[in-house]
Amino acid sequence: RGGPPPAAGSVASAAEARLAAILLVTGAVSGLVYWLIAGRSVGNRTQRRGADAF
């Protein structure tokens, strides 16, 4: 109220910061999901029959 209007750059800067935060969270979530899925298969390799014959 009664103060100077915000500069046009600050509105763009706020939108850019919000977009960066959204992308950061999205990347972190997708990395976590990938890590959880990849971690499920560690140590579950089954040996094929005759694989150790040679």
Image: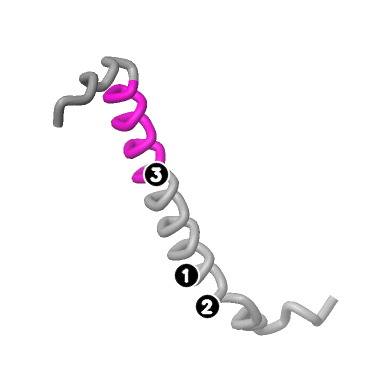
Front in this rendered view, residue 5 or 24: 5
Q: What is the CA distance from the residue labelled 2 to the residue labelled 3?
A: 29 Å
Residue at the spot 32% in from the left edge and 32% down from the top edge? 14
Q: Which residue is mark 2?
A: 40
- Secondary structure under tag 1 reads helix
Q: Residues within 10 Å of mark 1 (few under 14, many from 20)?
A: few
Q: Is residue 23 above or below residue 54?
A: above
* Residue with the most extreme right position: 54
In this picture the colour scheme is: one colour
Majority SS type along the magenta span: helix
Residue at the spot 49% in from the left edge and 71% down from the top edge? 36
N-terminal of the pair, mark 3 or mark 1, is 3
* Residue with the most extreme top position: 8
Q: Which residue type carries mark 1?
A: Ile
Tell me where residue 26 appears, x and y as whole percent: 38, 50
Say if mark 1 contacts mark 2, CB within 8 Å. Answer: yes
Q: Which residues are magenta?
A: 10-22
Q: Which residue is mark 3?
A: 21
Front in this rendered view, residue 30 or 45: 30
Q: Quadrant of the C terminus?
A: bottom right
Tell me where residue 17 appears, x and y as whole percent: 38, 35
Tell me where residue 19 appears, x and y as whole percent: 33, 36
Tell me where residue 33 appears, x and y as whole percent: 43, 65
Query: Dividing the picture into quarters, in which one does residue 18 lie?
Result: top left
Q: What is the CA distance from the residue labelled 3 to the residue labelled 1?
A: 24 Å
Residue at the spot 27% in from the left edge and 15% down from the top edge? 8
Q: Which residue type carries mark 2?
A: Arg
Q: Which disc number belongs to residue 19?
A: none
Q: Which disc number belongs to residue 37?
A: 1
Front in this rendered view, residue 49 or 13: 13
Residue at the spot 67% in from the left edge and 82% down from the top edge? 47
* Residue with the most extreme left position: 1
